[in-house]
Image (tube, coloured by chain):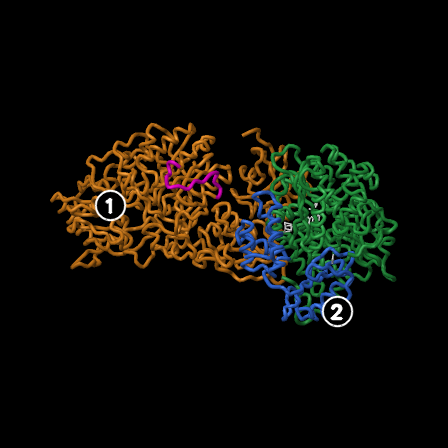
Amino acid sequence: MPYNKPHPAETIIISRRFHLPNSASIDTFLAHDGYKAARKALDMSQDDIINEVKKSNLRGRGGAGFPTGMKWGFVPRQSPKPKYIVVNADESEPGTCKDRLLMEFDPHRLIEGCLIAAKAVGAHQGWVYIRGEYRYLIDIMDKAIAEAYKANWLGKNVQGTGFDFDLSTHTGAGAYECGEESALLESLEGKRGQPRIRPPFPAVSGAFQCPTILNNVETFCAVPDIILNGGDWYASLGVPRAGGTRLLCISGHVQSPGVFEVPIGFPMMRAINEMAGGLRPGRKLKAVIPGGSSCPVLKADECDLPMDYDSLAKAGSMLGSGGMVIMDDSTDMVKAALRIIKFYQHESCGWCIPCREGTLWLKKILTRLDDGIGVRSDIDLVGELAENMLGRTFCPLGDAAALPTISIVKKFRAEFEARLAQVQVPAGVSESLVRIHV
Amino acid sequence: MTFSPELEARLAKMLESYPKGRERAALIPMLMYTQDEVGHISKELAEEVAKRCGVTTLQVEEVVGFYTMLRTKKMGKTHLQICTNISCLLVGGDELWQHASKKLGIGHNQVTADGSISLEEVECIGACSWAPAIQTNYDFHHYVTLDQLDKLIDDLRRIQ
Amino acid sequence: MSNPVNLTIDGKAVQAAPGTLLIDAAKQSGILIPAFCYYEGYSLQAACRMCLVEVEKFPKLQAACTLPVAEGMVVRTEAASAVQARKTTLEFLLTNHPLDCPVCDKGGECELQDMVFRYGAGESRFTEVKHHVDEKQWSPVVYYDAPRCILCYRCVRVCDEGMGVTALGITHRGAYSEITPNKGDHLNCDQCGACIDICPVGALTSGIYRYQTRPWEMEHVGTICTHCSDGCKTTLGVRNNEIVRGNNRDSTGINGEFLCIKGRYAFDFIKHEDRLQSPMVRRNGKLEEVSWAEAVKAVAARFAEIKAAGGAIGVAGSVHSTNEESYFLQKFARQGLGTPHIDHARSGDVPALIHALAGKTDALATADSLYHAKAVLVVDADLSQQHPFLAFQVRANVRHHQAAVYTVTRGPVREEQTAAKAVHTADYLAGVRGLGEDLKKHADLVIVFGDGIKGAAVGELVAFGDSLGIPVRYVCLVDYSNSRGAMDMGLLPELGPGYHPAAVRGMSLPQMAASQDLAALWVVGADPLAGGKRLASGKAFVVVQDLFLTDTAKQADVVLPSASAYEKSGTVTNVTGQIQRLKKGLNIMGAKPDLEIFGLIARAMGVDAGRAQNEAVFEEIRKSVRGYNVPLPVLATGGAAQAQPVNGRVDVLPDPELVRSAGDTLFTSGSLGRYSKILGSVMEAPGALYKG
Ligand SMILES: Cc1cc2nc3c(=O)[nH]c(=O)nc-3n(C[C@H](O)[C@H](O)[C@H](O)COP(=O)(O)O)c2cc1C
Ligand code: SF4
Ligand code: FES
């Protein structure tokens, strides 16, 4: 994995060990404050840990941005059932590639975060659910876990505190939907990755129908520094309703794409222009997907804003998973819309009608439009069908498919129209029709 | 059916890493790791894993059908996966895909006649900031150019 | 109910128990929220999104099938937004649906058609290529057409949760998801067909019904299945004097929608080519077809002769005949022919149970008690195989009320899957006693027992039940559709109707067969000489009334073709003493109901055994048989009336040695099953009991 030195404009907190030689080893980790926070947390009360996390204004880094401390607080104190920790390392949102770095370069940080969370709610077992494609990361995590067991940061009576905690990795097998928390739990239990009816939420009934803390890798990774330096410190790094830093994965039409750690509220244009090296010479910004492909696309003129939850919401989009996809003026928005819907169609689990049938229909129409075959009302139809999915599906994947589609059709309608005007209906079968994969 | 000693050891540990009575949880990992050794999920393998995890073969089938990485068909010695999702698309992922498909003469989820390479157009593999990206089996290749892909395919053909 | 929740649905003030789902609360107040995947009694899916409704204060439409009612909730089920959502969801659904309604079996009974009709998603904007998959045959009785499937998962749930079989699953993903059978390309299951009936569209179709008819061309005849003793109501679809299907979609009857393979398909025996359609008389050693008049004359003349000569006449009654027929037969025998020798094939020791329960009230369980009891103990029965509906009730009880199930059997049974404890032993009473401490913990208990508990053991079982200190009710299992009625009506040498001791004790069936002096044997729907057995008395005049040329009939002097339960009216009593009415579905040329045959013989003999007519005989039964004084309207409207527990001692107890269950499985049914090609055609039919 290529990892360059941090950019000077970054605020490196969770990525601060990335550039150390042999950063994944427990020795490096211990030599650089590793497990200090866990040691501290093991002597703290459950309430104190949760309060510190609440104070930090840490919000989930998996996409939805739910306040983490509040989520942990939902886990019932008194439960006859065991409690579990589950790490969402399914990282499959197009445009997102940050959890990979955390696990590759600082796996012990994740283990430490899990241990603190376990202590906070009284859990004694946990799993890191890693997408199947990340086999090499599973190996890295397995190795780190083995080291942690050996050094007694995992296992029975951790560091003599009487606290037990077991952790293991669990591989996925190729399904974006398994990133959705309830589908992930089904998958963890050996079933099809179909989402569950919620409520109950995982905090009450999660893995094996027991209370479960389920968070994104980056969320767990933020916890040790919060415990070490205090929630107030972490909160102060961000904006009033969202604390800390987060990893931005910048991809697409920039000169130096990469993953950068910035405080929440960092200006989007600075991220693009300074850290990611700006656009290629002679190119102009056309659009940005600010937080993974599930977010509505922003036009260039909408991008001058700070990267925080509220500002993006005001602009009609979302902070999402931190996957920023930058598109310059060479981008074919019809193709982009088609590629995005193709993804959601491929990944739709099939449980509910609007998503299952809606994504397929959209893919078929967009394929046609991309070939220039169609009539103007097809463009409206695309927008309308996406609207008809929105808010009506069983899980948010349906919305994730609808939102970017609606925004592209609305904001780049002219391109669709131009495509229809430009291409003559060819005789014979179109190429992209052939390429619909079943 | 038995597997290599290393895999057997892994499977034994796997079954222990879930709460008692929840052996079904090992189903997907067990399918993934045994598939790596056997090549694909044959009927026999499905039955074996079903037995070990305490589920029916139908339950195995349900799972296998759901996950794209689980395959009932033999793939090539090297499974070449080319990402064409949005970040890769913007920087040439589609061209890589077209090139590989043409060069190998096979399409999505097909295998070359000599069995050396199979091809798959995959969804985002989490390498967006280092796009365009491809995977050969579990190995990642970043910032892939057409020339590199060309050479890679030639190498893979040679080592069949 | 703890404090009810008040809410408003479509402007109507509604009250519901806390925890009630909105869709149920609406239904209780007469408001039907549409749904495909929601199905009462089965687990929730929230997958079809048809039940989305507008709820005040919620930013998005809410799925009524998973939303519990809340105080002050204001719901609009037909708000413009909800209607628009439904309409568009239907539009989505129809994109890949083949729209082959004109040739689809479900046409006219299709929930998708009805829904489109209601929401008017008539015109489609879908102009793309549909995804086609060929239809598959999963078993002789089940076909699956994937493109028609709307993936509501009802079939998967009814198979898993309802039947405990789990033969159906889902493979592939997204729009390519398909329902899949457990054996890859075929089904190995109970072949109950519940998946077909519960399918809202024509995705699952029945091997025997497909392409036979349009639903509106059938007459729907609600009657009682003639196979096992559970007494399921089955609605026969009759067209042109032919049964084209059986189901119970109208959900009336004790079994709701439940039917097993026999109730749903195994009526084809009535059209078997071996079916007798003409009376026969033995001439020169050979059975020759004769007219009804001639045959009846021959029987009457010979019976009169023997009666006059004081010869012994044996009468074997049927476990499939109606109560009216059995009652009339014993009366005709005892009073008209003056013979005490009357019996039938006994499969459960009901008299012993009634005797043991003397002095108790409410100690006989019904099918309904099996659904409500806190605990159920099954002794010596493979319930899922032998009494599929009772087993279904127990499963539903476990699912809905977390009932505790205990089994004491000689081998593995399906009930063990969810049993609190399962004991394998052939010493049933010892097994039962070992569970005493567990059973005591429950608020009430139903004990279901097979023929392994008979005679004195029944008394011991009841004494054990008494010792538990909780209310215990019992079911004594018997085999066939009117096994229970045959006993209640007094087809026993020791007992008359209502378990009154017979004036004179007659011979049992084995005794008749062994008697050197037997002058005549009149066999009605029974096969006492099955397997080529011979009567000890060489001179006996043998008359057989049956559907087929049974082993006994082959030895008969006169054979009279009789009508099956689907070809006549009358009442039958199920294993738990519930009386239900048969409704005639069709005529089979040449065959006559037993009662009519009895009447003809009586008239020809000049014997007065009362009017051989259903209503008249049932009136007499109501008056004279303990427990049968049931309200007629219940029966007339197709309901089940509980025969009131016979409360008292049975002074003469029949010989327990004669109690023997035939041990039928789901795929066998005494003499009738043999003639059902459907029962014989299923692929991996288990065919054996105690396989789990
Ligand atoms: C379709 C879909 C895919 C998702 N994929 C991921 C994922 O890959 N990784 C992740 O952490 N969260 C993913 N999420 C979000 C999770 O459901 C969940 O909100 C998150 O893991 C909670 O952790 P957090 O609070 O730390 O963000 C996904 C959600 C949806 C609806
Ligand atoms: S929206 Fe529906 S079909 Fe799509 S992934 Fe979620 S549950 Fe599955
Ligand atoms: S889009 Fe190709 S790796 Fe993410």
Q: Colour of chain B?
A: blue
Callouts 2 and 1 close, C-beta under 8 Å:
no
Residue A149 seen in this snapshot: yes
Start and end of the magenta stretch? C417-430
- In the image, A407: left or right of A184? right
Q: List the residue tagged with mark 2.
A: B151
- In the image, A46: left or right of C647? right
Q: Nearer the viewer, mark 2 or mark 1?
A: 2
- In the image, C26: left or right of C314? right
Q: Position of residue A8 (x, y in %)?
A: 88, 50
Q: Quadrant of the C terminus of chain A?
A: bottom right
Residue type indicated by callout 1: Ala
Say above or below: A205 vs A178. Answer: above
Residue at 12 percent across and 44 percent down: it is C308
Residue type indicated by callout 2: Lys
Among the chains pictured, the one given orange colouring is C
Q: Position of residue A334 (x, y in %)?
A: 74, 60
Secondary structure under tag 2 reads: helix
Q: Quadrant of the N terminus of chain A?
A: bottom right
Q: List the residue tagged with mark 1.
A: C316
Which corner quadrant of the image does residue B156 belong to? bottom right
Query: Residue under mark 1: which chain is it in?
Result: C
Residue C174 seen in this snapshot: no
Which corner quadrant of the image does residue C290 belong to? bottom left
